[in-house]
Image (tube, grey):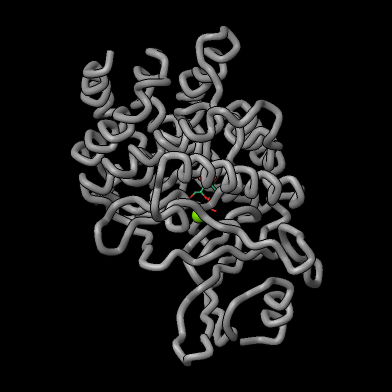
Amino acid sequence: MTKDYQTILDAFPLEGEVVSVDPFGNGHINDTLRVTVKDPNGTEQIRYVLQRINHQVFRDVETLQRNIFTVTEHIRKKLEAEGDTDVDRHVCTFLRTKSGERYTTYEGNYWRVMLYIPGSVTVDAVTPESARSAGRAFGDFQSRLSDIPEGTLGETIPHFHDMAFRLHELSEAIREDRVGRMQEDRVKKLIKAVDDRSDDMLLQERLYEEGSLPKHINHLDTKVDNILFDKESGEVLTVIDLDTVMPGYILSDVGDFIRTAVNTGAEDETDESRIGVDMDIFRSYVEGYMSSASSFLTETEIRLIPYGGRMMTYMQAVRFLTDYINGDTYYKTDYKDHNWDRAWAQYVYLTRLEERAKEMSDFMTHWL
Ligand code: GN1
Ligand code: MG
């Protein structure tokens, strides 16, 4: 372990002696590490998760951390009131520093610490049972946050899931063409596919302006690797990665699970034959979600759930493509074409979802 980690961790009231700090998870934005400690009796265990907050992306760390504490404390109270006997495994617990701050700074970077949840895992592939449990968990998550008063949570990334803004960013990237990637025929082809669908993909914004689509507090990053499952039972423990919890459309949260967990391929899949729609997962997830959310969703929202999957997949294709054209400045990448592969894989998956759109919509009639 480096002296730097030791200094950062010293700011927090940790139990046990830190023995190692290792990379953890596969987030595209923040750096995440797990912290192993040794207790006085000699046993070693992972007890904390340390994160370096990407402050290029989250420019207002103060607001970010205030939101996260508000959200986790709110959920904790709800769970306690519901009589949950395992609250520490069902919501993330962030530590304040020894001087009472919600994060610490070290050499120009911002760091935070939360408790590691023992026996938890993230998965790439869900089963129908775990998809059902995930659906219920998101419904409960939205419903538990629904009474946070308006104006309490700040916007941690302005216009985060605003489609018009994302399309504008893409057109700026195209105009600037900073690294010459607009020369590539494949890029032009994908831009054409994006343009062909842009009207349809602005539907939420139109409905909102007409007053027929509400906003709720949402997680806004409910991809499958942001869910912790119990290693033994496969039940959902909690959603993690709360950086983008803020007002938005429910279709963002529903849609991101369809984008990731219902896809038989990976987010950056290069073998197109592996990309497809797992209808069993879709159905189980929707059943789980509706068992909790049917109490607060409008008919329009229910009807639009399959659209939410396409919309989020499209938005992600646009965002990866924009970053590719900009020369990979936003998402962490493992190799030169990584953002391209991600953008294209999202587009291929979108076409698969389009092929199954009717089947998915028909399924929603159970609740209409
Ligand atoms: C980012 O941090 P991570 O990997 O969970 C991104 C999401 C994208 C996702 C794509 C703040 O999430 O919006 O959907 O990658 N987070 C931010 O996998 O931009
Ligand atoms: Mg994440």
Q: Is residue 8 left or right of residue 368?
A: right
Q: Is 335 situated above or below 69?
A: below
Q: Which of the 4 image quarters holds residue 297?
A: top left
At x 54%, y 76%, the residue is 35
Give the quadrant of the C terminus. top left
Give the quadrant of the N terminus. bottom right
Q: Is 93 situated above or below 349?
A: below
At x 21%, y 36%, the residue is 279
Q: Is residue 2 left or right of residue 196?
A: right
Q: Is residue 349 left or right of residue 60?
A: left
- Residue that sits furthest to the top in the current view: 210
Q: Nearer the viewer, residue 319 or 217?
A: 217
Res 85 visible:
yes
Q: Position of residue 92 (x, y in %)?
A: 52, 55
Res 313 visible:
no
Q: Nearer the viewer, residue 203 or 18?
A: 18
Q: Position of residue 204 (x, y in %)?
A: 51, 19
At x 37%, y 13%, the residue is 299
